[in-house]
């Protein structure tokens, strides 16, 4: 999924005149040299990534003998389907939330300079440097029964009894949104920054107010960035493990946690593999669907 | 806001800059500029980069706020008006076409913003497309057009809502020379047909001379001189204007005497013809300026005027430039027709240099 976004951002860059050098460098190496250069990484990936995954996923089809029974179990058990649906709903809601919260931040980042710009950029980027584990525990500290949020609300006299905040869908949603937010802000910021400022000026000059100029020019031209961020976040959220496992509870299981349970606690590797395969197909499906949509989008825009 | 089209009284200037200044921190980009533009006039703002010409245009369009002074369009004060309420057409340096909209949508944009209905929009878009010779290109995307075609679309978008004033910010800067000359003529013809008031920013003095009814020259944010192209070319008020417009020889000269009939000027110790109307009161060092095409070269040793030696002949197609080393003065350029008998001069030949008295301009020497 990150391949999609980096390729998109790369395309946006290569469209700018100043960065043509990178594409001119293409084809400088012959075929043999290219293969030699990529061979070490290719071999490493094959040995420690593709082989184990293929091996693992294949167990859902061949244990104890050639069978689809694990998939029948998966799709026959309402609990698993509920978890699958909940996972998709949480991933979708997270994507929507990051879009709503992240887009204005990205827009702000294009309009400010100096110290303010540095502060906002740091606020976006520092969480990326912090371990997901740390950030998830921080949410536990905030949301637990006698955590900061409940204490503050009680001090202010808004509530008498502490609310159940932790181990809910809401807690998972809030924590995942916070963890994934930079993946929306950064691609949107990159596309916004590439929109020439004179386009907005032209719209204003031709009679559009601030809002209409934004809706007619800035918003549509920034959609590829928002779409790239949305795909990345949706796919990451589908397979999110640590945050839901810590902040969510036993009743708010997501598919990654379920896979881990099946594999490590119940030693039901074939079912874990079947669940993983479904997750993989979902992720790839969403990525390709979006890429196709974006591709069509491009054709409409640039014909 | 659209009513400004109607109340264009005879004596109301289409655009009026009144003591307009713009400071960025300690830098003064525009310094107390006052100028009126008559309805239907084609005014060029020229000057080197950083002279404030684009800032002046941006203030009129509403993208920069003046630090002091007022701006009026057709007699209406627009100083504090938002850009979208000014009803001024503008062609941007890099066209600024909306890349995600078709040519027709780009051109229809200002009409839609003005609430004009679909059928009238389509009709007017078709009209201006024909006017800029792009019939049938409405459904293309801007990226599918050449630079010159994109320029025409930008032009069409700026005129389709019939604004009383059209601003152009170096609109031809990105085009190659041939296409630029072609578009200069087209813009000029279009302007004449629409009787539009145009304010045109360029750093290309030749372009300004060709296209304008009037040229305003800016230097370091100040309006140095404004007038018809011919007037500026033939009677530059300052050495800067003389140097900026066209080609000019500058020679160190000395005022050695004056009486009621005129002044006596020498260059390199020799008397030269000058008929200045300027009021020069003191003797002393000055700069004498004369255009290469006004320099007369006479073969053979000098009887009068300056004497020099041919350095080199430079062939330029229809013209020939003769570079002459003048004794104790330096090099001087003379421009003659390529067919002139002077083409047979060779390096080292002695020549005499002179000019018609009214062709010489005197300016104070820098620093004196």
Image (cartoon, helix red, strand yellow):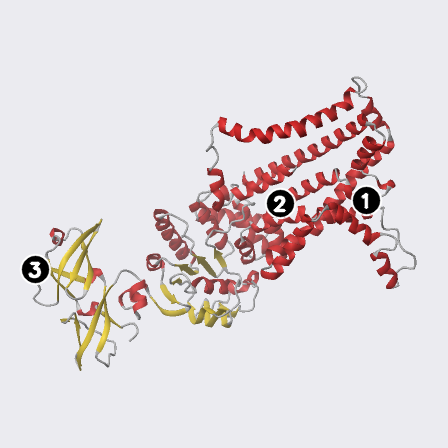
Callout 2–callout 3 Cβ contact below 8 Å: no
Query: Element under label 2?
Result: helix
Instruction: Write down the residue under mark 3.
Output: B300
Q: Chain of mark 3?
A: B
Q: From the viewer's perspective, is the residue at label 2 or at label 1 nearer?
A: 1
Q: Are marks 2 and 3 on the same chain?
A: no
Nearer to the camera, B71 or A132: A132
Residue at x 43%, y 54% (from the top left corner): B171
The residue that appears at 49% across and 64% down in the rendered structure is B60
1 vs 3, front mark: 1
- Quadrant containing the N terminus of chain B is bottom right
Residue B144, can we see it? no
Residue that numbered label 1 is attached to: A246
Q: Residues within 10 Å of mark 1 (few under 14, many from 20)?
A: some
Count residues near mark 3 (Cα–Cα under 10 Å), then give few for <14, some for 14-19, many for 20+: few
Q: Quadrant of the C terminus of chain B?
A: bottom left
Residue A28's disc is none
Is label 3 in a helix, a strand or a loop? loop
Q: Which mark, residue A225? A: 2
Q: Give the Cα separation between the discs numbered 2 and 1.
A: 31 Å
Classify residue B189 as left or right of residue A179.
left
Q: Secondary structure at mark 1?
A: helix
Label 1, label 3: how far apart the Cα atoms are = 102 Å
| Image position, residue B336 (x, y; %) | 18, 56
Q: Return the x and y of residue A52 as percentages of the image width and height.
A: 70, 27
| Residue B167 x, y percent position in the rendering | 46, 59
Measured along the vertical axis of the image, is residue B263 above or below residue A29? Answer: below
Circles 2 and 1 on the same chain: yes
């Amino acid at each position: 999924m990150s391949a999609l976004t980096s390729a998109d951002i790369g395309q946006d860059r290569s469209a700018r005149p100043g960065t043509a050098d990178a594409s001119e460098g293409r084809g400088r190496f012959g075929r043999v040299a290219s293969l030699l250069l990529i061979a070490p990484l290719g071999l490493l990936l094959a040995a420690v990534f593709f082989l184990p995954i293929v091996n693992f996923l294949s167990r859902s089809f061949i244990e104890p003998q050639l069978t689809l029974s694990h998939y029948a179990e998966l799709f026959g058990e309402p609990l698993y389907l509920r978890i699958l649906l909940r996972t998709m709903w949480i991933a979708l809601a997270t994507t929507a939330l990051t879009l709503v919260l992240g887009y204005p931040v990205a827009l702000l980042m294009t309009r400010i300079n100096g110290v303010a710009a540095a502060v906002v950029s740091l606020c976006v980027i520092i969480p990326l440097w912090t371990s997901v584990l740390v950030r998830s525990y921080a949410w536990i500290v905030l949301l637990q029964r006698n955590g900061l949020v409940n204490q503050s609300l009680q001090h202010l006299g808004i509530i008498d009894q502490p609310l159940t905040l932790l181990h809910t869908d809401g807690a998972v949603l809030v924590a995942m949104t916070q963890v994934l937010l930079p993946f929306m802000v950064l691609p949107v910021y990159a596309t916004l920054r590439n929109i020439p400022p004179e386009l907005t000026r032209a719209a204003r000059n031709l009679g559009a107010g601030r809002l209409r100029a934004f809706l007619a020019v800035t918003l549509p031209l920034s959609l590829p960035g928002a779409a790239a961020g949305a795909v990345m976040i949706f796919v990451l959220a589908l397979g999110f493990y640590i945050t839901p496992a810590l902040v969510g509870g036993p009743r708010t299981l997501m598919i990654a946690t379920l896979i881990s349970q099946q594999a490590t606690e119940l030693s039901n590797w074939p079912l874990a593999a079947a669940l993983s395969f479904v997750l993989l197909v979902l992720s790839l499906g969403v990525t390709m669907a979006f890429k196709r949509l974006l591709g069509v989008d491009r054709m409409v825009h640039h014909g | 806001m659209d009513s400004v089209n109607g109340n264009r009284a005879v004596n109301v200037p289409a655009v009026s800059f009144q003591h307009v200044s713009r400071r960025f921190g300690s830098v003064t980009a525009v310094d107390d500029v006052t100028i009126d533009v008559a309805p239907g006039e084609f005014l060029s703002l020229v000057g080197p980069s950083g002279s404030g010409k684009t800032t002046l245009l941006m203030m009129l369009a509403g993208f920069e706020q003046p630090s002091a002074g007022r701006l009026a369009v057709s007699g209406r004060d627009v100083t504090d008006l938002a850009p979208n309420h000014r009803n001024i057409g503008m062609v941007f340096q890099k066209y600024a076409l909306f890349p995600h909209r078709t040519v027709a949508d780009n051109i229809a944009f200002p009409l839609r913003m003005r609430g004009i209905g679909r059928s009238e929009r389509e009709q007017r878009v078709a009209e201006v497309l024909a006017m800029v010779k792009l019939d049938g290109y409405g459904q293309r995307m801007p990226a599918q057009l050449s630079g010159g075609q994109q320029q025409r679309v930008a032009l069409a978008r700026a005129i389709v809502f019939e604004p009383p004033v059209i601003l152009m910010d170096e609109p031809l800067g990105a085009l190659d020379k041939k296409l630029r000359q072609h578009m200069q003529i087209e813009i000029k013809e279009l302007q004449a047909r629409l009787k539009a008031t145009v304010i045109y920013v360029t750093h290309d003095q030749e372009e300004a001379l060709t296209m304008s009814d009037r040229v305003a020259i800016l230097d370091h944010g100040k309006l140095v001189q404004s007038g018809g192209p011919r007037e500026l070319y033939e009677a530059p008020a300052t050495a800067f204007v003389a140097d900026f417009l066209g080609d000019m020889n500058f020679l160190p000269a000395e005022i050695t005497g004056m009486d009621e009939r005129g002044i006596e000027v020498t260059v390199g110790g020799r008397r030269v013809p000058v008929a200045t109307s300027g009021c020069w009161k003191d003797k002393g060092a000055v700069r004498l300026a004369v255009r290469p095409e006004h320099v007369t070269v006479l073969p053979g040793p000098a009887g009068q005027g300056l004497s020099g030696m041919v350095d080199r002949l430079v062939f330029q197609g229809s013209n020939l430039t003769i570079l002459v080393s003048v004794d104790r003065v330096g090099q001087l350029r003379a421009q003659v027709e390529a067919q002139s008998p002077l083409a047979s001069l060779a390096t080292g030949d002695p020549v005499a240099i002179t000019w018609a008295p009214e062709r010489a301009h005197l300016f104070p020497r820098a620093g004196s």
